[in-house]
Amino acid sequence: MVKTVFGKSTLFKLLLGEEKYQGKIISSDKFIKFPPVITEEDYNNMGIELYYKHVMFAEDWKLFKELNMLGIDTELLYRPFKTLSHGQRIKILFAIFFLKEEGVLLIDEPTNHLDREGREILAKYLNKKKGYILISHDRRFLDNTIDHIISINNTDIEVQNGNFSSWYENYKRKEKDEQVENEKLKREIRKLKVAQENTKRWSDSVESSKYGKENSHADKGHIGHLAAKMMKTSKNIERRKDKAIEDSNILILGVSFKENCPDIRNTKVVDIYREFREFGANVDIYDNWVDSDELYNEYGVRTIPQIDKDKKYSAIVLVAHDNFKTINFEYYHKAGTVVFDVKSVVDRRFVDGRL
């Protein structure tokens, strides 16, 4: 039993003995956190020195073979580790720790900061490996690497054969069945409420007939006139708001489920897009993390390949990736563009609203 909220990261902490729990975890294998904690000394050393430190009876040719599979030049092994890019460091660490062969790797979001080509190379590499548990929000990456899914549910944990897509198909089917059952229950509840209200009105009517009603004569004509006037005013305001949004250009920055990853599963940004479209706005979505074809296949929406700097946007809705911080929001602010910052990424001076 875990006292904190149970999720993917908590599962890893339990297996690593970093989270308190009651009961037993039985395993014949040792669990190894990946990416590992790198010391300051390791950062200053060369990659080849890390290999000798972690792998007993290390043979250079084995490491060279692994790095070749990962598309890494072996010359990088002889540079200070801290001078390498994040993607290069991750791939070298993968090669070292799979050669270590001391236990099960617990791999947490390995595709962060990798471009599409880097993700594809790493997926092919992991597809040939065994003995790891993987956490990732990248569904395409999961499909190309795994053969089992561990599903952490509200009341239990399920292990299912297959990749992410096969699991997700089953999940959506179960979800649909549950929705049908819930709607059925809601209809039954509504029927009970109607019956209860009818019974109450009948009871009140019988009671009032016994004692009579107070002789109250409200000016129903005057009240009706005021109601009609308020309704007309409300409709006029609504029409003016609709006209202001109609034909305007709106830019949505970020469509993925989570910042700095390509996962579009359960994203709510598409709902924002559709709301603007219903008002007649022209809406562009830019997200360099997301595959436009995958987004279209899932939601019928595509991203733009790049931001048109000459295009006049009436509003920008910022969802959040680190690379969006480099955008000149001061320019848009001075041009009169409304900037809504969902994740508090932009300088407050150039933002019109935040959650």
Image (cartoon, helix red, strand yellow):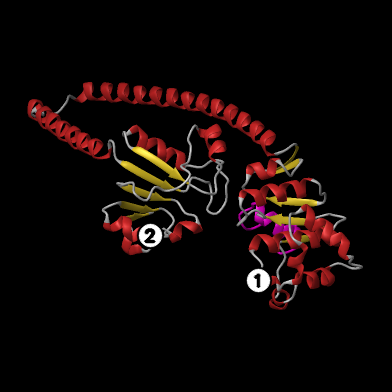
Residue 76 in the figure: left or right of residue 275: right
- Quarter of the figure with the N terminus: bottom right
x, y percent for residue 145: 74, 44
Mark 1 closeness class: few <14, some 14–19, many ≥20 residues within 10 Å: few
Question: Hey, which residue is sitting farthest right in the picture?
Answer: 57
x, y percent for residue 242: 25, 36
x, y percent for residue 67: 78, 58
As drawn, 287 above or below 182: below
Q: Secondary structure at mark 2?
A: loop
Disc 2 residue type (three-letter): Asn
Label drawn at residue 102: none
Residue 86 covered by magenta stretch: no
Residue 235 in the figure: left or right of residue 46: left
Front residue (pair 156, 23): 156
Disc 1 residue type (three-letter): Thr
Q: Which residue is depicted at the point 75% across and 46% down?
A: 124
**Considering only order in the chain, which callout, 2 or 1, is on the residue closer to the N terminus?**
1
Q: Magenta part of the protein: which range?
A: 1-22
Which residue is label 2 attached to? Answer: 328
Residue 14 covered by magenta stretch: yes
x, y percent for residue 304: 46, 42
Residue 340 visible in the displayed image: yes
Mark 2 closeness class: few <14, some 14–19, many ≥20 residues within 10 Å: few
Label drawn at residue 83: 1
As drawn, 243 above or below 261: above
